[in-house]
Image (cartoon, rainbow, N blue to C red):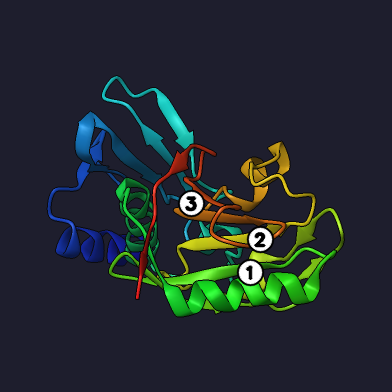
């Protein structure tokens, strides 16, 4: 029981607005904007907690266990603290709220060159984004690409809150996302670029995590 009490004390220290459910210290809700809550049941800690986004009437809005790296790689023998988990989830939610993205011209030109060099194979990678600006291309360890698809394992990267974007190419010339792109590549990223052949400013688009096209700006 002491381990549960210790986790609860850390939670209320960092999140004093946390709400107890039925006076159980292992069941907390963190109020979010728009009348939503982050609901966490950690009664079996150090086993993986149950985490959901819920509405005001306690209906489950979204399960988050498959989109949060700390939950995906949870280990009972060496578990993160519940506060660390809350921090990661709230960072993810806040990232989804941002709607503006800029990308450095030098980086973009380098990506065009990489796409041309790899054609007809796809490129696939992540973008490091600081203060709304994409500044670096990251090649994920073990990434596999072909003429029609790309794949990598997110858990090999570890958690990095600056890797908010993805980018891949479409050698076919179609800059629009496939269902696979939306359901897998885009799922946990805030900004998702697709560069289509012939790999220039007229064949690149950016999308949010739901596959909706969003504007981007190029910085010199």
- Element under label 3? loop
Residue occupying image coordinates x 37% and y 48%: 96
Residue occupying image coordinates x 62% and y 70%: 112
Which percent across, then down, holds residue 92?
39, 55
- Crowding near the residue tagged with mark 3, few <14, some 14–19, many ≥20 C-alpha atoms within 10 Å: some
Q: Which mark is residue 57?
A: none
Compared with residue 209, is residue 121 higher up or lower down, i.e. above or below? below
Nearer the observer, disc 1 or disc 3? 1
CA distance separating discs 2 and 3: 34 Å
Q: Are marks 1 and 3 in contact (CB under 8 Å)?
A: no
Q: Is residue 39 visible to us here? A: yes
Residue 193 in which image quadrant: bottom right
Left or right of 20 on screen, residue 142 = right
List the residue tagged with mark 2: 168
Left or right of 195 on screen, residue 109 = left
Task: State which tag comes first along the sequence, 2 or 3.
Answer: 3
Q: Quadrant of the C terminus?
A: bottom left
Q: Which mark is residue 49?
A: 3
Left or right of 204 on screen, residue 39 = left
- Crowding near the residue tagged with mark 1, few <14, some 14–19, many ≥20 C-alpha atoms within 10 Å: many
Which percent across, then down, holds residue 128?
46, 73
Task: State which tag comes first along the sequence, 1 or 2.
Answer: 1
Task: State which tag comes first along the sequence, 1 or 3.
Answer: 3
Q: Which mark is residue 125?
A: 1
- Crowding near the residue tagged with mark 2, few <14, some 14–19, many ≥20 C-alpha atoms within 10 Å: many
- Element under label 2? strand
CA distance separating discs 1 and 2: 6 Å
Which percent across, then down, holds residue 102?
36, 63
- Element under label 1? strand
Residue 32 in which image quadrant: top left
Residue occupying image coordinates x 36% and y 31%: 54
């Amino acid at each position: 029981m002491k381990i549960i009490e210790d986790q609860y004390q850390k939670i209320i220290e960092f999140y004093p607005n946390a709400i107890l459910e039925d006076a159980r210290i292992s069941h907390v809700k963190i109020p979010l904007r728009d009348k939503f809550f982050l609901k966490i049941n950690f009664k079996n800690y150090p086993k993986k907690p149950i985490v959901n986004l819920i509405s005001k009437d306690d209906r489950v809005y979204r399960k988050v266990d498959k989109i949060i790296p700390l939950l995906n790689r949870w280990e009972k023998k060496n578990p993160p603290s519940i506060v660390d988990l809350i921090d990661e989830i709230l960072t993810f939610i806040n990232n989804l709220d941002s709607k503006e993205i800029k990308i450095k011209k030098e980086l973009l030109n380098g990506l065009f060159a990489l796409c041309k060099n790899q054609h007809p194979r796809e490129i696939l990678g992540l973008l490091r984004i600081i203060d709304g600006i994409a500044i670096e291309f990251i090649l994920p360890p073990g990434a596999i690409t072909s003429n029609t698809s790309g794949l990598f394992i997110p858990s090999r990267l570890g958690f990095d809150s600056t890797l908010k974007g993805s980018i891949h190419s479409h050698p076919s010339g179609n800059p629009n996302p496939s269902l696979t792109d939306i359901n897998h590549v885009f799922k946990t990223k805030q900004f998702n670029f697709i560069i289509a052949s012939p790999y220039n400013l007229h064949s690149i688009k950016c999308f949010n995590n739901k596959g909706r096209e969003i504007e981007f700006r190029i910085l010199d």
